Amino acid sequence: MRYINKRFLIENISVTNLAKKFNTPIYCYSYKKLKTNVISFKNKFKSFNPLICFAVKSNTNVNLLREIRKLGYGADVVSIGELMKALKAGFNPKKIVFSGVGKTSNELNYAINKNILLINAESKSEIIEIEKIAKSKKKYVNIGIRLNPNTDAKTLTQISTGKKENKFGVTEKTFIELVKHAKKTKYINLKCLSVHIGSQIVNNQPYEKMLKVVDRIIKKINHKFEFIDLGGGMGISYNNKVKKLNYKKYSTAIKNFLKNHKSKIIFEPGRSIIGNTGILISKIIYIKKNKDKDFIILDTAMNDLMRPALYGANHQIIPAIKKSKNSKKTYEFVGPICESTDKFLTLKNFQKLNEKDLIIICDVGAYGMSLSSNYNVRPKPIEILVKGSKIRIIKKRQKLKDLI
Ligand SMILES: *Cc1c(COP(=O)(O)O)cnc(C)c1O
């Protein structure tokens, strides 16, 4: 994704042409970028050959899931719907793990019938529910228990999951109790310890702390875990200012950890695989001039991309066609929805914009479309996958008539 002769291209296709052909807004992904991310993530940890399960919640497009599966990954799901999509995309059940604090009896039942690799339980009540179902089916079920390592991931508080005040996982004390309980239970095979401390983590210290906690607890209890599931959460650069996660250090820390524990490592990355593969293309409807700033009113809104409204996240905005003249005004990029949080970014010294110009919101591959809604009865955007000079519609634009 780059400018050639001032026009922004995704692989060999210009954004302007896509907008002409499909109208806007458009979620557009690059296959090449996706493939590069999938392979490079795998290579970063290749010395211990982990099982990598893509976190489906970050992007649930079945066609993208299928491409990720073809490149050798498994899937991490958090609901029966995601599990169904993962199966539809052809993931081997033996490469699927199921996380989440509130799996219903119906969801557990379905997962057990499908013989997935692991159900990562997050409470005693859930383990009892799994036991009940397993017993009624006379079936041995592989589970993990999610530990809350009480580690601050040093990320946005809204996406931090590994501190004791968060609802996720169980405390060390409960964990030890549950291990004892699970080992006594006939139809449960306790195979995994899982952790996931948060998302958009760019500092490797929290990961190293987490490993220390896991190491200490395993040494305390007499149980061999076939798998240690370290979750996902690896951050990406949404702008040049954000520091990058040091994968080398993280990988080394895991290698050291594995000297004492002969387990297979599982990862559940979402954002780091899909985040920077996608852009959101939008057209300016109106420019509303104001004293201090101009409102750039786009045809995309918080219903299409919720992260700025939900977390105060910043996504870079760039023009589809570069012009040399800059505006002296401050631009505030907003959507048409009746909420004051429906704004994306405020920028100074942006190039001079006109109504009907196209702009691009960057790095929206993760938690973009998957968090979208129909708020204000707005149909969801079309999704397109570009591979070289080929354009593939991987999800049609929702039709108004289906919403009404
Ligand atoms: C959300 C989530 C992930 C993926 O997080 P990313 O930050 O997208 O890598 C992995 N595991 C679990 C349990 C999650 O809830």
Image (cartoon, grey):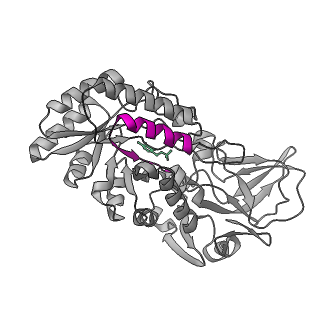
Q: Is residue 246 above or below residue 11?
A: above
Q: Is residue 28 left or right of residue 285?
A: left
Q: Pick out the residue farthest to the top.
A: 173
x 82%, y 63%: residue: 354
Q: Nearer the viewer, residue 269 or 220?
A: 220
Q: Residue at x 52, y 37 (%)?
A: 159
The picture places residue 276, in percent across and down from the top left corner, at 60, 56
How many numbered circles are shown?
0
Instruction: Identify the residue shown where x is 90% and y is 61%.
Output: 325
Dividing the picture into quadrants, the one containing residue 3 is bottom right
Q: Is residue 392 left or right of residue 268?
A: right
Residue 131 percent coordinates (x, y): 16, 38
The picture places residue 77, in percent across and down from the top left corner, at 37, 50
Residues 375 and 113: in front is: 113
Q: Is residue 366 magenta?
A: no
Q: Is residue 264 magenta?
A: yes
Query: Is residue 367 among what the camera can see?
Result: no
Residue positioned 43% across, 42% down in the render: 231
State the residue lying farthest toward the front.
259
Query: Which quadrant is home to the N terminus?
Result: bottom right
Q: Which residues are magenta?
A: 248-270
